[in-house]
Amino acid sequence: MPTKLTRQQHQDLYYFLRLNRRVDEQLVALYRQGKVVGGVYSSLGQEAISVGTAYALAPQDLIGPVIRNVGAMLIRGFRPRDLFLQYMGRRDGPTGGRDANTHFGDVARGVIAPISMLGETVPVMAGIALAAKIRGENRVAVAYVGDGAMSTGPCHEGMNFAAVQKLSLLIVAENNGWAYSTPIEKQMAVRDMAERAKAYGIPAVTVDGNDALAVYAATRKALARMRRGGGPEMIECQTMRMKGHAEHDDARYVPKKVFEAWRRKDPILRYERYLIAKKLMTGDEKAAIEERIESEIRADVAFAEASPFPAPEEAARPVFA
Amino acid sequence: MRRESNKASLNPDAATLQRMLYYLKLTREAEYRIERVLYRQGKIVGGVFTSRGQEAITVGTAIQLIAGDVVTPTHRDFAAHVIRGISLQEIFCNWLGRVGAPTRGRDGGPHIGDIRRRIIAPVSPVGAWCAVACGAAMALQRQGKGNIALTFFGEGTSARGDVHEAMNLAAVMKLPVVFVCNNNAYAYSMPAEKEYAVESLAVRGPAYGMPGVSVDGNDVLAVYAASRKAIARARGGKGPSLIECRTFRMTGHSAHDAAEYVPEELKRQWKKKDPIDRFEKWLLARRIMTRAGIKALDAAIQKELDEAIAQAEASRLPEGRDTLEGVYCGPECWWGNPSVARGPQSVATH
């Protein structure tokens, strides 16, 4: 892989992949204990996309994540406790206990909070890229969009606008095969999401979304071109949604053998095997990373569970100026 | 006219070719009366939008519709209404805001249609009707009689989300829809190069998984040939197609827009490519029409327009007592009235 990552960077990537998965698992556990307010939308199997893309960005870039991009939010500086506080509706969470799942962000950390209407990230991030262009700032705006979201009108309008205005908008098209229970063949009549980019004159590549380094390398390449004023790009990352749409969906409509086939292509196991084989990570280093993650998670869960709920008197506080 | 369109034109027979000339000229002359006469006399209620220079797009496509087909025209598809059976008198009543109009004096000239004649009236949020055309096409697909939905939109409209959702749905469900893009170079004052970053909107077709072609929108035979193919595809259950017709908007966006932002040179160049002049010359060269025949046609059209306008001007304006007509269900309405038959024939209580 022509990625020129240092040993430490490789292990950082591994750390974030593992952290993403462990945070996800912890959220599921909290959900099953009845402690989560609202739904839990897992990113199981898709971690390499969030982590591979976000890790390639510069501090001045901004992301517009959606429900399965927790890994990207962690790379931008959110901690597991922020997610636990948010999902459990606590006062000290990123939305003060007022919104659910990944509907949070922080402009200072370059994270634009998503909403439920998928596809809306695209025109919003295009707007951010436009602002950066007007101000002469070297920023890339990243919009994550799934196969379902790509069928929405706002997605079309945002991509077309970015192309006409030659904005530094990176569209990360996550093709995970399913939009709730709609399989990809009922979502679009072309094979790859990358075909869509041709409608706008946006260059696009399709990569194995379960190969963290392939995702990282494609992102680096796209960013370099965009920073030279090349205009928007699309990276389609093909993967599989390894669970239902949300924890309340048992995904009975997905044939079992599809899950089995994709389990063998698990992105974290693949990357782990790669690092060990290339001697970029020893068994001890791996154990240390995992231990570090475990203690982080333990501490952050405890912290979040002990955190207060918002007081009713505070309900109107951030509503009016 | 190039060789290819000559071969294809063997398909429209002489009678159809003559009908096409009639509708082209009727559109031009009727719109002249609306924009340059009635509007300037202050007789039109609301704004005026015409299709000058773009007539071949509507005529070349809509002339191929059969009974049971559905059409969703834009504000620049005058001929679609006439071809589908709306009378000139009804059209002028609509522009003049009279009671005998399809919109009964309640909506402006361009928002004309009639669901009984399977014309879905356009609305101001352009492109919204493309998704509606898909809904109609879903019904037609289920009915299995080979009917299609023909939908028009401009290049500016192509940037709207509604068009995207419609084209995607049509492709996935293989709906019998023909998408016709009138690329007339300007969306109000927005030039086409600010609407899209590709060479031609034809590429939008394959991006959804449907064929996409680009034709000279000022060549009615090229439009006819391309849409014939697309219509046959749709009737045969093979799904939707996209046809981009490249033309030029020879007027402002509307009668109140002087279009000073359009370079004079562009207007001059496109005037030389007038679709009606071209087709007339072609018909004369092949002796499908004679000069005398064309002169007679012109005179007949003027007479038709004179009569229709006179009738419309003599029609009643809506009055207070008309206001609630058709708003609430009456005894003739099917809702909650089992003895009245359901279906499109009962939707129109007016």
Image (spheres, coloured by chain):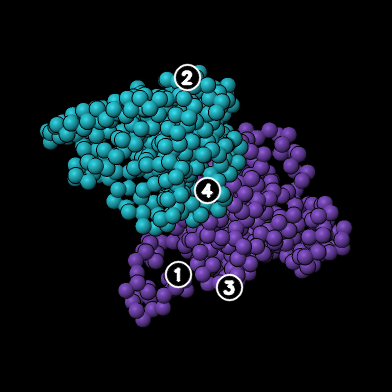
Chain colours: A cyan, B purple
Can you tell which of label 2 and label 3 is closer to the viewer? Answer: 2
* Secondary structure under the numbered disc 2 in the rendered image: loop
Residue underneath mark 4: B164
Tell me the kind of residue under disc 1: Ala
> Closer to the camera, B109 or B143?
B143
User: In the rendering, at what x and y percent does residue B141 appear?
Assistant: 54, 67
Under mark 4, the amino acid is His
Task: Sort mark 2 into few (<14), some (14-19) or many (20+) by Cα contacts within 10 Å.
Answer: few
Q: Label 1's element?
A: loop
* Side of B171 where B215 appears, left or right: right
Q: Earlier in the sequence, mark 4 or mark 3?
A: 3
Q: Which residue is mark 3?
A: B145
Question: Which is in the foreground here, disc 4 or disc 2?
Answer: 2
B311 vs B201, nearest the viewer: B201
- In which quadrant of the rendered view does residue B158 lie? top right
The residue at 40%/29% (across/down) is A14
State whether residue A112 appears in this view: no
Chain letter of disc 1? B
Q: Are marks 1 and 4 on the same chain?
A: yes
Q: CA distance from mark 4 to mark 2?
A: 43 Å
Q: Does A14 sit above or below residue A34? A: above
Q: Which residue is mark 2?
A: A6
Q: Is residue A309 left or right of residue A143?
A: left
Give the spatial CA distance, label 2 vs label 3. 65 Å
CB atoms of marks 2 and 3 within 8 Å: no
Q: Amino acid at mark 2?
A: Thr
Mark 2 → mark 1, Cα distance in angstroms: 73 Å
Residue B348: mark: 1
SS of the residue under disc 4: helix
Q: If the image is split into quadrants, where does the C terminus of chain B sit?
A: bottom left
